[in-house]
Amino acid sequence: MRIESPIRSIPEPFPVPEKLENLPGKLIYFSLGSMAAVYQPLMQKMLDILEKLPHSFIISTGLIGDQYEMKHNMYGEKYLPQFSVLQTVDMVISHGGNNTLTEAFFFGKPLIFTPLFGDQPDNAQRMHEKGLGRRANIFGPTDKLKQEIEDGIEFCSRESVISRMKQASERIQKDTGMDKVCEEILRIIQKK
């Protein structure tokens, strides 16, 4: 059976942190996932770049989040309710795993990918090719990565990208595939 999204219920949106409320620019969610957030050199490289951008960031800092300093344009927690945060932000910078990709589509949020391993490079490349997000090489030189992130934010701010992601979100949210899957599981169980 085909389903558009495994999301069944939508929690309340995450409140914009007070320290970010009146800052200019976009509000962006940043996460490298629980595994990569513990690799301090990579995480710190990204935080140093984000600090210099004219935007504000909600950051999932992971297990060792208390070791990262949140600058003036950042709010971070070790664990964030991603579903709630995605409803609040304008876009996402992420490693681009399947969960984040699916959830971002559900809420219509353009993505800037910093893929690390596994399915992430393929997800990033496909979104880049389809014009629904951008890819940045997190392992490249810092200056180049910063430029790729800036270009990605500019791209993801385009009305055409926002509109296409919104259309995808509306289609996905209307899908009743999850209910059909649950009904099919019950049917199979009841047969036994």
Image (cartoon, helix red, strand yellow):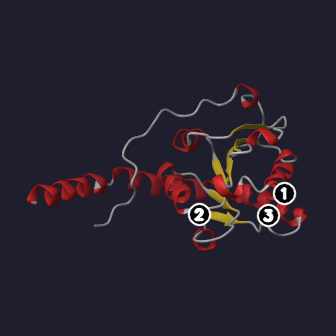
Q: Local crowd at mark 1 within 10 Å, few (<14), some, or many (≥20)? A: few
Q: Position of residue 11 (x, y in %)?
A: 46, 36
Q: Is residue 42 left or right of residue 159?
A: right
From the image, tell me which residue sits under label 2.
Answer: 132
Q: Earlier in the sequence, mark 2 or mark 3?
A: 2
Q: Of the two numbered discs 2 and 1 on the same chain, state the one appearing first in sequence.
A: 1
Residue wearing tag 1 = 41
Give the image location of residue 69, x and y in percent.
84, 39
The amino acid on which the numbered mark 3 sits, given as a three-letter code, is Glu
Provide the secondary structure element on which disc 2 rests.
loop
Count how many numbered circles sit on residues in the image: 3
Give left or right: position of 78 versus 169.
right
In this rendering, the answer to whether 127 lies above or below 35 is: below
For the view shown, which residue lies furthest in the left direction? Answer: 191
**Position of residue 111 measured from the top left corner of the image (x, y, whole percent):** 63, 57
In the picture, which quadrant includes the C terminus? Answer: bottom left
The quadrant in which residue 18 appears is: top right
Label 1 to label 3: alpha-carbon separation = 19 Å
Please say if 40 is above or below 68. below
